[in-house]
C-alpha cells in the first residue's frame, strides 16, 4: 500500500497549477472527456448524477424530516435518538448521513453548525451546501463570534439563550431541529415541512413563521 | 498540519456573503465536477486523503480557488500521484489508452447508489474507552504534521465530554487507507476557555475528538 507523501502531493499541486489552464471550466471539461475515454464513467451517468442533486436531493428532504418530527412525537423521539436510522423511514439517507445527529433548538438553546477544517455537510439530506457555508469568513467566524454571524443572518439571540456551535470535525453530521412555529396546530406534515428553511436546519435561521406557506 | 485550511477563529474576515435562493450549482462546470468526483479517484483515495490533498494546496490557491475547483485539484493530484493520469492527459482531455465505457446509471440508479452512500464510520474495537461522559479532559498541546482533525483553536484547552459515539475510523491514519479506529467523543468548550473573558458566557463550542486527541485534565 503506497504511503501518502504530503510533500510530493504539494509539489504535484504546484506542477499542475503551472501546466494546466487557469480556467476551471476548461480543466473540468478535459477531465470529463479523459474519464470517458478511459472507460471510468459515461456522459449519461454524469447527466443523471447532476439531475439527482439539482432536482431530487436537496433541503426539501431535510424539511420533510423536520415536518414529520413536529407532527409525530414517536418519530421525533427516534430522530433525536438516532437520526441516521430515522431518516431511512423517509428514504432520505445518502451521502454523509451515515452518522447523522439531530440537535434541537428550544426557547433557551440555539444550535449552529459549521465545519472549520473543510466544509463537511450532510449532502444526502440537505443537498449541495450553500456557498456562504463553505466561505472562509463563515468557517473562521462561526466558532469565534457566533452571535455576530447570526445577526448578519437576521437572527438576534437574546442574552439568556445559550448558543451551541457544532464544529463537524469527525464524520458525524449535525442537523438542527428548529422550533415548531406557533399557530400551526392541526397542520399536516406536508404543510409543516413547507415552513422549514434550509438555513434553519444549519442554524442561521431561527424563528420560522406559519405565514410563510 | 498547521495548514491554511484550519480557519476556526481566524480574524480579519468580513461579513459572510449570503445567497438568497437555493441554487444547487452556480455554474455547469461545478455540477460536472461534483458528479465526476464520485467516479474519478485512485483505489486509495479515502475521504481523508481527499481532504488532505485539498489542505496541501498552496495557501494562496486554497483561499482563492472555488470550492469545486479545490475538489478538481485534490482528485487530479491523487490520480497523477498514483500514476493513473498524466499531466498531458489532463491538459488535452485525450486518453493515452482508451477503454470501453461502463454501463450507464439511470436517474433511479443514481438515487439508489446515493442511498447506499449512507455509511457509518463507526467500527467495533476491543479496548474500553478511557474517558466517560461528564468527565473533564484536555486536548493535545501540539498539532501533528500530517492530516488530523483537531482544530488549532481547540488545542491544549479544557472541556467536558458530553457524548461518546463508539469507535470511529481515525482520519490521521485513514489518510493512508488504514482505518485504525479509536473511541470518539464530543467535547464541549466554553467560549471563554477558547477565546478569553470577552466571549459570551453562555456560548459553547463542541468538537468531535478521537481518544488520542485527548489527555487527562
Image (tube, rainbow, N blue to C red):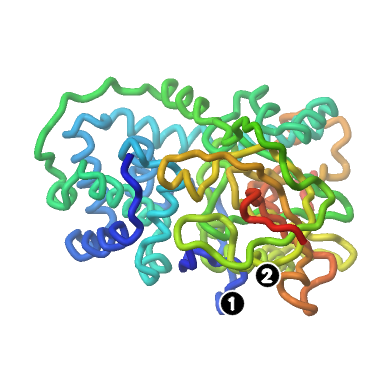
Please give the name of the residue rendered at 49% of the width and 67% of the height, measured from the top-left corner: B2
Report the side of B146 relative to B149 (left or right).
left
Quarter of the rendering containing residue A24:
bottom left
Nearest the viewer among A134 and B9 is B9
Q: Is residue B48 above or below residue A15?
A: above
Q: Quadrant of residue B16?
A: bottom right
At x 12% / y 42%, what residue is drawn? B94
Expressed as whole percent of the image width and height from the top left, the position of residue B167 reads: 64, 38
Determine crowd level at label 1: few under 14, some 14-19, many 20+ residues with C-alpha closer than 10 A: few
**Where the N terminus of chain A falls, by quadrant?**
top left
User: What mark, if any, has residue A63 been given in the picture?
Assistant: none
Q: Report which residue position mark 2 lands on.
A: A144
Mark 2 is surrounded, within 10 Å at the Cα level, by few (under 14), some (14 to 19) or many (20 or more) other residues, namely many
Q: Is residue B147 above or below residue A143?
A: above
Relative to B82, does residue B141 appear above or below in the rendering? Answer: below
Residue A195 visible in the snapshot = no
Which residue matches tag 1?
B11
Badge 1 element: loop
Quick one: quadrant of the C terminus of chain A?
top right
Of residue A172 and residue B179, the one placed in the foreground of this image is B179
Amino acid at each position: 500500500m503506497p504511503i501518502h507523501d504530503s510533500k510530493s502531493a504539494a509539489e504535484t499541486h504546484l506542477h499542475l497549477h503551472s501546466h494546466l489552464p487557469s480556467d476551471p471550466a476548461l480543466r473540468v471539461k478535459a477531465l470529463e472527456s479523459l474519464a470517458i475515454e478511459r472507460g471510468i464513467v459515461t456522459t449519461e451517468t454524469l447527466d443523471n448524477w447532476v439531475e439527482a442533486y439539482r432536482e431530487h436531493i436537496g433541503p426539501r428532504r431535510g424539511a420533510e424530516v423536520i415536518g414529520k418530527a413536529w407532527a409525530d412525537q414517536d418519530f421525533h423521539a427516534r430522530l433525536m435518538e438516532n437520526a441516521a436510522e430515522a431518516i431511512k423511514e423517509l428514504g432520505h439517507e445518502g451521502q454523509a448521513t451515515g452518522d447523522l445527529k439531530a440537535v434541537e433548538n428550544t426557547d433557551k438553546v440555539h444550535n449552529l453548525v459549521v465545519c472549520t477544517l473543510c466544509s463537511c455537510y450532510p449532502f444526502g439530506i440537505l443537498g449541495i451546501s450553500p456557498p456562504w457555508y463553505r466561505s472562509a469568513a463563515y468557517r473562521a467566524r462561526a466558532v469565534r463570534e457566533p452571535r455576530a454571524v447570526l445577526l448578519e443572518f437576521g437572527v438576534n439571540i437574546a442574552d439568556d439563550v445559550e448558543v451551541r456551535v457544532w464544529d463537524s470535525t469527525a464524520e458525524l453530521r449535525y442537523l438542527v431541529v428548529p422550533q415548531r412555529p406557533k399557530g400551526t396546530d392541526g397542520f399536516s406534515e406536508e404543510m409543516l415541512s413547507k415552513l422549514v428553511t434550509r438555513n434553519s436546519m444549519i442554524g442561521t435561521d431561527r424563528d420560522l413563521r406559519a405565514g410563510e406557506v | 498540519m498547521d495548514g491554511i485550511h484550519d480557519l476556526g477563529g481566524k480574524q480579519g474576515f468580513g461579513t459572510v456573503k449570503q445567497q438568497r435562493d437555493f441554487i444547487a450549482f452556480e455554474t455547469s462546470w461545478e455540477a460536472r465536477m461534483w458528479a465526476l468526483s464520485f467516479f474519478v479517484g485512485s483505489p486509495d483515495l479515502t475521504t481523508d486523503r481527499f481532504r488532505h490533498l485539498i489542505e496541501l494546496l498552496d495557501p494562496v490557491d486554497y483561499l482563492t480557488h472555488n470550492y469545486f475547483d479545490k475538489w478538481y485539484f485534490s482528485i487530479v493530484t491523487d490520480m497523477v500521484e498514483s500514476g493513473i493520469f498524466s499531466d498531458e492527459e489532463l491538459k488535452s482531455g485525450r486518453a493515452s489508452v482508451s477503454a470501453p465505457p461502463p454501463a450507464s446509471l439511470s436517474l433511479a440508479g443514481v438515487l439508489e447508489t446515493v442511498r447506499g452512500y449512507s455509511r457509518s464510520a463507526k467500527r467495533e474495537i476491543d479496548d474500553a474507552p478511557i474517558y466517560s461522559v461528564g468527565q473533564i479532559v484536555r486536548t493535545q498541546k501540539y498539532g501533528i504534521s500530517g492530516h488530523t482533525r483537531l482544530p488549532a483553536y481547540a488545542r491544549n484547552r479544557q472541556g467536558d465530554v458530553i457524548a461518546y459515539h463508539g469507535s470511529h475510523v481515525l482520519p490521521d491514519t485513514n489518510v493512508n487507507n488504514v482505518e485504525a479506529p479509536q473511541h470518539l467523543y464530543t467535547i464541549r468548550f466554553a467560549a471563554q476557555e477558547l477565546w478569553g473573558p470577552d466571549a459570551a458566557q453562555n456560548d459553547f463550542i463542541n468538537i468531535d475528538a478521537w481518544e488520542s486527541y485527548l489527555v487527562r485534565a
